[in-house]
Amino acid sequence: MDGGVMSQEEINALLNSSGDDETTSASVGELLSSDEKDAIGEIGNISMGTAATTLFSLVNRKVEISTPVVSFATWSDICDAYERPCVFIRIAYTVGLDGSNILVLKENDVKIITDLMMGGDGTNTEQELGELHLSAISEAMNQMMGSSATSLSSMLNKVIDISPPTADLVDLQDTVDESTIDEFLSGEFVKISFRMEIGDLIDSEIMQLYPVSFAKEMCSSVSKNMEEDTNSTAGARKKEPAPAVAPQPMPAPQPMPQQPMGQPMMMGQPMMGQPMMGMDMSQMYGQQVNVQPAQFQAFSGNMPMGFGPENIDLIMDVPLEVTVELGRTSKSIKEILDFAPGTIIELNRIAGEPIDVLVNGKYVAKGEVVIIEESYGIRITEIVK
């Protein structure tokens, strides 16, 4: 550039670079079209509606999930909008779809749901979230998302299956650590927000996070299925109608037999076109029909000879499971959760009392415990009749 004047080549280069920037920003901004966002919302609405029904059967409380809201988000958006820490539940699709999504729940909501699943009233949320809670919420999500996959299979008209979900307690941070979160969370992704209510215990927001590519794949599957349905319907309409069948001439009506004046019609008198009760079929159709009484073999009082002795040797090699039961007791779920190394469990049997011997679960004998070299054994003291 000489004296502040730009050459034509420099002007063209400047214009081309500006156009490239606009194209790049437009491609980043338009991740999903409005139709694709509507399709994702409808998929989420149907799948989470089915999941809510399954969750109701697990917690025995009324579950309501609102209409989903589809938007785009980044990791910093999730960190700013959600409580810390929270539970990330990863669901991977193994059949029918290639991708995964993440369900985000608040820590306190997970405690309430797991307490309800264990028979509590949903108020036992003081203890720290541990492996038992994560295992229970994973099983709940396995059943919920399993039923959701079934609904999705019907919508996409193909088999869809998921892997067992995994749950992790994640402490949201502003910086993205790709070693602890999924790779797609480092960029822009699809966020589907629901409002979930469980009785009067939970009223909060849950989220589903999808990679953009996975969301586009689901939209493409829905569009393809709708096009196939439309084509099949149009093809059925194009089929020519079957030729009309020529009407058959109606038979001339038979004359009604004259009823004598003043004589009422008797009950049981046949109507026109119906055979008279007790009338021989040969009289009706003018054909000879061979009719004979049924022949049955007479019963005799002679009983069959007894069978020979059973050959029990045929079953001598069948293995049976022998169980020795020292005693039993019953505990509540709360007491079982308090088990720790050193806990003593009292059984319903007095010391020195004979123990039970069961064969395939059937009580057959009593016995006492003995030691054979370095192993326990049982000496039979009584056979139960």
Image: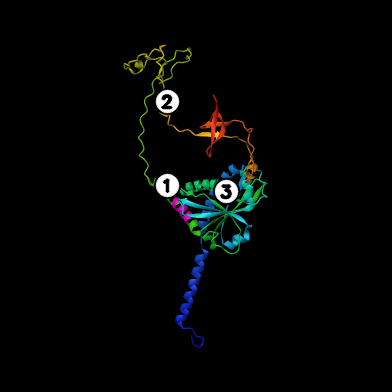
- Crowd around label 1: few <14 · some 14–19 · many ≥20 (10 Å): few
In percent of width and height, residue 182 lies at: 53, 59
The amino acid at mark 3 is: Ser
**Is residue 248 shown left or right of residue 336?**
left
Does residue 233 belong to the magenta stretch?
no
Above or below: residue 270 compared with residue 329: above
Q: Looking at the image, which residue is at 48% across and 52% down? A: 93
**26 is higher (above) or lower (below) than 83:** below
Q: Which mark is residue 233?
A: 1
Assign the magenta stretch its main secondary structure.
helix
Q: Looking at the image, which is closer to me, 179 or 278?
A: 179
What residue type is disc 1 on? Thr
Q: Position of residue 363 (x, y in %)?
A: 54, 29
The numbered disc on residue 182 is: none
Residue 312 is labelled as 2
Label 1's element? helix
Give how far apart the Cα atoms at labels 3 and 1 are.
Answer: 47 Å
Sequence-earlier tag: 1 or 2 = 1
Q: CA distance from mark 2 to mark 3?
A: 49 Å
Residue type at mark 2 is Ile
User: Which residues fall within the magenta stretch?
Assistant: 217-225
CA neighbours of label 3 inside 10 A, class few (<14), some (14 to 19), many (20+): some
Q: Residue at x 50, y 70 (%)?
A: 22
Q: Earlier in the sequence, mark 3 or mark 1?
A: 3
- Left or right of 343, for residue 276: left
The residue that mark 3 highlights is 135
As measured in the structure, the alpha-carbon distance from the residue carrying label 1 to the one carrying label 2 is 66 Å
Q: Position of residue 320 (x, y in %)?
A: 47, 33
